[in-house]
Amino acid sequence: MKKIPIFPLQLVLFPGEKLPLHIFEPRYKDMLAWCLSSKSPFGVSSFIKNQISRIGCIARLDTVEKKYDDGRMDIICTGTDRFRIKKFDSAKSFLQGDIESFNDMKDDAGEKQLKMEQLVPLFRELMLLASQETLSGEVQVPAQSYGFAHLVGFELAQKQKLLEMRSEQERLQYIHKHIRKVLPQIKAFEEVRRKIRSNGHFRTLPPLSFNIDE
């Protein structure tokens, strides 16, 4: 079991994701100073409904972009591996946790590929609707489930649920189900907006074809 600093934030960090942070609170300035001196990563755990989530993601400190005279820092981190907090430790000015690895179970490669193929058309449709106009070029499709997380309108709790799933197949299915649910709502909203835009403006109307009986 390993002990690392824990940084509770109102966000979810996913493996492979870049995270810029401005460090300004005294306890987190202490935490970063400790991480730099000990060459240690820290853990990002989401803070939801006044609770620190036990499942989080390790943040590797890539660069310190700027150091301020008062100890504040602008840093860039990258999410690496998921962890589970077994025990909290508040002995220092910043929170620490005894953690263990939290890895995926084995997936069926064929099923995983099928889930991705089913998801991609829905995702493209969602992106085209969300852009409010036709996108120029091809919609960029993420290579794995975590890449969809910030693009499909998930709430914080939904992102955390995705992080806690232990199967890529399950995560892809979860995203697929979410998009299927929100697409009709977005389409309905777009139709209302189209009707609103059509009111109060000059419109070109097609000529009517009719006969008048005399």
Image: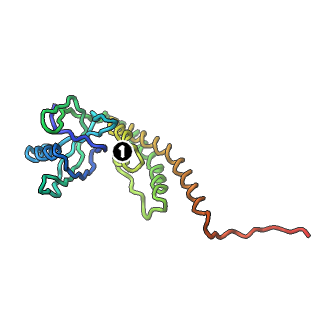
Secondary structure at numbered mark 1:
helix
Q: Where, by quadrant of the figure, is residue 113 drawn?
A: top left
> What count of labels does the image hold?
1
Q: Callout 1: few (<14), some (14-19), or many (20+) C-alpha neighbours within 10 Å?
A: many
Q: Which residue is mark 1?
A: 145
Residue 140, percent from left and from top: 39, 56
Please tell me whether residue 206 is drawn above or below residue 32 in the rendered image: below
Q: Quadrant of the N terminus?
A: top left
Q: Can the viewer see residue 57? A: no
Q: Taking the image as drawn, is residue 74 in sight?
A: yes
Residue 190 horizontal side relative to residue 88, left or right: right
Q: Position of residue 214 (x, y in %)?
A: 91, 70
Report the coloring of the rendering: rainbow
Is residue 209 placed above or below 27 in the rendered structure?
below
Q: In terms of image quadrants, where is residue 161?
A: top left
Residue depicted at x 26% and y 51%: 18
Q: Nearer the viewer, residue 60 or 67?
A: 67
Residue type beneath disc 1: Ser
**Please, which residue is most extreme toward the top here?**
87
Left or right of 67? Residue 198 is: right
Residue 144: where, in percent of width, then height?
34, 46
* Nearest to the observer: residue 119 or residue 210: 210
